[in-house]
Amino acid sequence: MLVLTPLLVPLATALLCLLVPPGWQQRVSLAGALLLLLCALALASQVVGNGPLTVVAGGWPLPFGIEFAADRLSAALVLIAALMLNVVLLWQVGGSADAAPAAATLQPLLHGLVAGAGAAFVTADLFNLYVWFELTLICALGLLALGGGLRQLDATLKYFVLNVVGTLLLLAAVALLYAATGQLNFRALGAATAQLPASIALPLLTLLSLAFLIKAAAFPFFAWLPASYHSLPAPVLALFSALLAKIGIYALIRCLSDVFHPAPDLLFNVLGWIAVLSMISGALGAAYHWDLRRILAFHSISQIGYILLAIALASPAGDAAAILFMLHHSLVKAALILTAALIFHACGHYDLRRIGGLYAGRPWLSLVFLLLALSLVGIPPSSGFWSKFLVVRQSLVQGEYLWAAAALGVGAVTLYSMLKIWLEAFWKPHPDESWQAPARHRLLPAHAALGGLVVLILSFGLLPESLIAYVMAAADSLRGRS
Amino acid sequence: MSPRALLAEVLLRILHPVLLLASLWILLRGHNEPGGGFVGGLLAVAASAAMALTLTTAEARQRLPLPPPRLTALGVLIALLSGLPGVFAGQPFLTHLWVTVPLAVTELPLSTVMLFDLGVYLAVWGAVGGYCLSLLATVEEQQ
Amino acid sequence: MHATALPLALVPATLFALLVLSLISVPLPWSVSWPWIPVLGVDFALYVDGLSAQFLLLITGIGTLVAVYGAGYLAGDARRWRVFALLLLFMLAMIGAVCSDHLLLLFLFWELTSVLSFLLVGFDHARESSRKSAQQALLITGTGGLFLLAGSILLAEIGGSYSLRQLIAAAPAMTDDARLPAALTLLFVGAFSKSAQFPFHFWLPNAMAAPTPVSAYLHSATLVKLGVYLLARLDAAFSDLLFWEYSLVGIGTLTAVIAAVQTVRERDLKRILAWSTVATLGTLTMLVGLPGHGAALAVAALFFAHALYKAPLFFVAGNLDHGAGTRDIDRLTGMRRHLPWTATAALLAALSMAGLPLSFGFVAKDAMTLAKVEAGVFALVSHATLFVGSISVAVAAVAAIHIFWGRDNVGRDAHPHEAPVTMLLPPLLLVALAVLFGLQPTLVDPLLGVAAQAMAPGFDPLQVDSSYDAWPVAEASLATFGFGLLIYLGWDRLRTLLDRARELDEIGPESWYWRKLKFVPKLAAWLTRRLQHGVLPGYLLTLAGAVTLALLAALLVGRPSLELPSAETLPLPVVGSALLIATGALATLLVRDHLVLLLVSGLVGYGSALLFLFTGAPDLAFTQFAVETVFVVVAATVLRRLRQLPPPLQVAVSEARWRPLALAVSIALGSVLSTLLLLAAAQPFDPQLSDFFSAQSVPAAHGRNVVNVIIVDFRALDTLGEIAVVALALVAALPLLKLSRRRSS
């Protein structure tokens, strides 16, 4: 039952939020989020203690029923999703610092998004996975359109059209794999695909990977991400960046490294170069922009490149690096987005050219940004450093020198763009000389949410032993190694 | 109001409950004969849409048991909850339970499957009905 | 009211005292290690040998004096607490760096020092030039750090350990590995960027934007020595490699010469001192590269001597800035009468810098000359060091004679005044030590001996002394001194001469850096405007094109054989739905109006829904229907709203010039997907699932309608998901629906 909670708890909360009177909505929402967090913790501890948990809905024998299975990889991502949901809802309580508009549909859609993501992380059935992709797509769409302004609608349209193509390609891939093998359950599908001639399996898996790469916002499919992210209110953006692209990446790891293992080498080789191009184009996009949210959005693409690079290494250590990088990026990027929201609150703008003076005006915010930015760049001892270190080391160990060089070079460009934010927002005097940092009204929930996140991130950086051991075990349990 | 419209209105006031009853019947027989929650829900939507087209969307909205978003949410929630009795009986989620209630002449099989299908029915009715009514309301206001 | 931050100097002072006591009572080396990340083999492993100990003494000793000096220098400045916090953190990071035995730990502290240096250089961040200098310092040392990381990883892979001690022990076995030159090159880049070696040398003078105590500490005594420290640390392992020797001697000498020339071009005393620091760092790099025990001793001596004379000179520069309001050497003359104590410190420091007898600088110069003789360096290197040494003499003369003993032409309105005692004690103490050790070198012999031992295992001071030949040393000293005096006398003329060669800057690495710094945003703009142009059809085209190419490549790699199925088995409704889909798709090509286009494209979606319905998948049909409806509703609303926009913001739905390409890509994608479908369908289908559902529908699931049983029982979880999609789609679309209603009313 525990393995179903990533779906059932947020879905039930979303529905209850629609059913209860408006005054109760926030309480129900917070209670549901907290319950989800507890379930996710329990799930993780069960998985660590007793190994993967599985259940087949309806109790049907495999491969006929729909299986939900949680291993360490799934449990970690579910935990991150639950955590981020709580952070976002806590932020939303204050209602200031670029919070989402208090629409009646906000809470159901947030929970619906997490339900879709959570279920996608634990399902062990390819068609069922597609269903959860749809659920996240619909909820994301609703959240994007929430403000109803012109920017939001433009972003919604681009997000929707490009993602629908990805979803349809995924559906096509599921259908074609089913036509070729007659299976949908991961294990049965993997075994059956291994029997297919290589000349058929390669294009089918390519199609499946392409669908996931579109969802993951990899080069050259990333256009939807920068086109839509900058229009979102900060807490929703934080949740998006922690979940949306990650679902695609998760599915890619699950399929290439687990379900269809051993996937064709060619696929991994090409993936490596896609990763390199994603890293470069994302980092340069960030260097180009002046809007904080756009900079952070492009950074996500570059960081996704790192994760894909780790997957492309096609080794247990590579997978471990990919998982660690995913966890790190979900937390740090979300924290940076929330930091940007506080910058916005202090200066009234996301545009670096119109803000400044925060080093003197907001010393604690400066410190938080500095720590997070250094983590993103990969300066030790930070979660970002350990993630990047694992990727680079494994690339070098496997003799992929060009990939390692790209990873390090992009690190330098990342440093450049983070420095840009620092120089403009913090060191440069505010362009308006009469500017004064505004009073901090109703910021306590926001500060609590960001502070908690930062403490977690710092502890992962300083004491990464248990986390790295966890992701290594998670990578080892892929491919039926456990 | 023209006599024709009046006739249509009278007819619809009679037809509407009949259509709804029919949709319920289709829902209930679905497990063994063609039908089920999806189709039943569609028929219910048709009933609401017909109401909206002949009379007003407001009228059709009033005839719904709940506002569309709540109706559809309730449906999904019922479908979700129908999976829980199995869990309490020590089975996996969505394992359906069957009981047979003896009646005078025959036996009535009852199951959580029916609850699930009812959920599907309400979800479809609420959601698709909701789209239709909203769209029709847009057209209505433009006229 | 004065120097409220003075008590903070107790922190480094205590550390210094503890260190001295420990050095006296506990024999070197010290080592301690705690497990940190066992799964990665990362230990918090510290190891202190003679080399580390020498650095520790400098870090804490100079640190104490800098703290005392800084308390005076920054008295009354509101930002002093921040500066002191950063300085103390920096000191800890430096201590960590020189004590680390684990390469990753070293890297960690190394990067920390870079970041802290960045924050300190940007002290005066309201000025754009300060920000640029700070940015430059971090970009260069930070990027260099990335090379260091790569080099460390590679070195650890070759040697099988991240422990410096184990790597040094394993070095003889590593020389055969083909990756070693690459690993060392990467390490060199890291070390050179940190220690301001060519071609990264230019960041250091620019870092003089920092407050003077910071410059004295970071950019002369400690931070910039870290790169040389790493090289010295690895010297024990790789000094026998010719690659090692040639690289270090070559780059070190080149750096020293370039820096020496640049020194003459400056007017700002601090920048003069910075360039001369770069020259010393180059000399140190060169000495590390030289083989032999004498070189090791010379490195240790020069480390020590440089700290003793360069820090006081920086303090002098700070006092002049503080007392006379300028650091321009053209405007500073005859300051002796106004700043007598500062003048004393400057004179004694200059003695050491020039390497004159009775100073510790003389001892260091002595050791250097011997090292060169022992190693038998090329004549070119020898001449170069002579030149660099002469410039040092000239700079020393500028700092001491020109500024303090020149003609007093201070205007009546300017009132230069002596610095407070907190700013005088530190330089005076250091120069006093320099004189003491110059008179009595045996006092520091043990310290230099153990440091040299760490660089050259089996170091034997006697071995150095045995080759003693007084004549070359004296000859070199005299030549340096005389030549240096000539340069001092011709300083102004030389500077005018060099100013004319300004065009040479255009090809130097610094202008390369600025060009690259401008190039990054340009490249970024070029690329981003092409990739993220904001035009949705363009995005779709890219997406479809990339998918098509990838699938085509995947098909071409395997070249599966394709058999076309016979058309007889197709039922009529299926053919009908397929035709509806095709009609809808083709009709989209002919329609211009956006809303009609949307509706026609809906035919495709609804046709697909019909197809699902006829092939027995109503739940899928239904979802398709719902999604399609939402899409139509949402897209229609959006399109209608966007029509009200001014033209520049309006989404260009189709651009004429892309149409032929779009058509080609669409046809190609359709063909590729159809080919895939035919291939997949040609595989023998495994009916296991459908057979099970048919067989178990009645006995296990109590239902005769198999489709319904699949929906509500066998795959009820899919259905739950789909009705959740349907329900939340309504929730998602509701605000838009209301929006469009409000618009039209």
Image (cartoon, coloured by chain):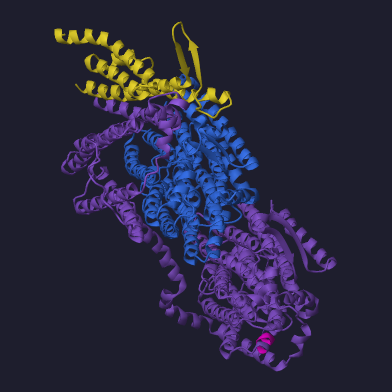
Chain colours: A blue, B yellow, C purple
Q: Is residue C453 above or below residue A6?
A: below
Q: Report the front residue among A303 and A398.
A: A398
- Residue C174: give x, y in percent of width and height: 63, 75
Residue A451 relative to residue A268: left or right: right
Q: Is residue B71 above or below residue B93?
A: above
- Residue C91: give x, y in percent of width and height: 67, 60
Q: Report the front residue among A26 and B42.
A: B42
Identify the image quadrant of residue B106: top left
C370 part of magenta stretch: yes
Residue C111 relative to residue C596: left or right: right
Residue C186 relative to residue C732: left or right: right
Q: Is residue C445 above or below residue A334?
A: below
| Residue at the limit of the structure toward the right, as seen here | C25
Can you say which quadrant of the picture contains the N terminus of chain A? top right
Please state the extent of the stretch shown in magenta in the rendering: C369-373
- Residue C192: give x, y in percent of width and height: 56, 71
Q: Main secondary structure of the magenta part?
A: helix
- Say which residue appears at 49% left-offset and 60% top-offset: A407
- Residue A421: give x, y in percent of width and height: 47, 51
